Amino acid sequence: MSHLHEFDESTWPFDAPINAASFTTRYVLDGSLPILEVYHDHDGEWQFMCGTTNASADAKLVCLGCIIGRDLTLIQLADLPEGWLAHRESPTQPWAREPYEDSDATNEA
Ligand SMILES: [Zn+2]
């Protein structure tokens, strides 16, 4: 479904399409918690997490452009490589980046 976003789409910096399906938590979606952990999955998907839950029952599907529109500091993470995560202590702190293991691959080994 096509819709507009709260920023200039002509400067979209992500490799993924602006309407790519991404994951977040219901607490981020309802505005009760900020995004403190961002995962760029080994399969290319993006996850924008509050850091308090990884339960699948709390996971919500969201348009990539819409979640970026909620927090424009996320644009700084557009070049985060696949298999890397970014985290911060609070929304006023800078993002720190590090690679992480592909949990799916470890389980299959
Ligand atoms: Zn959207």
Image (cartoon, rainbow, N blue to C red):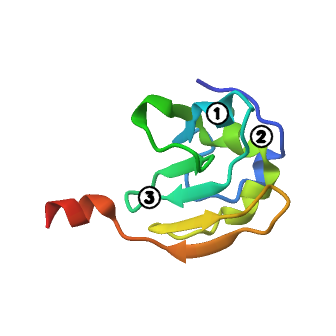
**Which residue does the image show at 72% across and 56% down from the upper left?**
74
Residue under the image location 81 percent in, 65 percent down = 93
In primary-sequence order, the first of circles 1 and 2 is: 1
Q: Are marks 1 and 3 in contact (CB under 8 Å)?
A: no
76 on left or right of 101: right
Q: Is ligand 1 within 8 Å of the beta carbon of the residue shown at mark 1?
A: no
Image mark for residue 27: 1
- Single out the residue that lies furthest toward the top: 1
| Residue at mark 3: C-beta within 8 A of ligand 1 | no
Q: Residues within 10 Å of mark 3 (few under 14, many from 20)?
A: some
Q: Is residue 33 above or below residue 97?
A: above
Tell me the SS state at disc 1.
helix
Amino acid of disc 2: Arg
Tag 2 near tag 3, CB within 8 Å: no
Q: Looking at numbered disc 1 in the image, what kind of residue is underneath it?
A: Tyr
Vertical arrangement, residue 18 with respect to residue 74, above or below: above
Q: Amino acid at mark 3?
A: Asp
Outermost residue toward the bottom?
A: 98
Q: Which residue is mark 3?
A: 41
Could you tell me residue 82's position as x and y percent?
47, 66
Instruction: Name the residue tied to disc 2.
Output: 70
Specify the quarter for ligand 1: top right
